[in-house]
Image (spheres, rainbow, N blue to C red):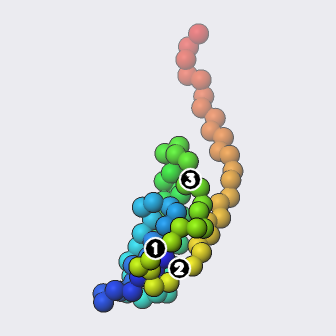
Amino acid sequence: MYKFLDEGVHGEVLDFPGTITFAENLERARISLASALVDMALTNLINGEPLPTPNSLLTDSEADIEEPIHLILTGASRVKVVPDLAVS
């Protein structure tokens, strides 16, 4: 959701708590919000926390614009070989 303020545009992903941004115009707010969403998702994953369940029914009555924002993740595994330095 986006809300127009005198100073610029506030953006927030309603179904991903903590994902908010502020920019001087709507175009920059959209770009910034997309980046914030990726950062929040990566932070959750690095910390071993689940991602919030998407909820397209959430709304904000004070929003000037509500539009979907999609998070697309690519999964991979990392293999780290650690030499066994223990002496038997």
Mark 2 touching mark 1, by CB under 8 A? Answer: yes
Residue 22 tag number: none
Residue 51 tag number: 3
* Label 1 residue SS: loop
Q: Quadrant of the C terminus?
A: top right
Q: CA distance from mark 2 to mark 1?
A: 8 Å
Crowding near the residue tagged with mark 1, few <14, some 14–19, many ≥20 C-alpha atoms within 10 Å: few
Q: Measured along the vertical axis of the image, is residue 10 above or below residue 88?
A: below
Residue 62: x %, y % from top left: 41, 79
Quadrant of the image occupied by residue 63: bottom left
* Disc 2: which residue: 66
Residue 85: x %, y % from top left: 55, 22
Q: Measured along the vertical axis of the image, is residue 53 above or below residue 79?
A: below
User: Which amino acid, by three-letter code, is at mark 1?
Assistant: Asp
In terms of depth relative to the viewer, which is nearer, 56 or 81?
A: 56
User: Which amino acid, by three-letter code, is at mark 3?
Assistant: Leu
Q: Earlier in the sequence, mark 3 or mark 1?
A: 3
Residue 66: x %, y % from top left: 53, 79
User: Which residue is located at x 45 percent, y 65 percent?
Assistant: 19
Q: CA distance from mark 2 to mark 3?
A: 21 Å
Residue 60 tag number: 1
Crowding near the residue tagged with mark 3, few <14, some 14–19, many ≥20 C-alpha atoms within 10 Å: few
Q: Does the image show residue 12?
A: yes
* Label 2 residue SS: loop
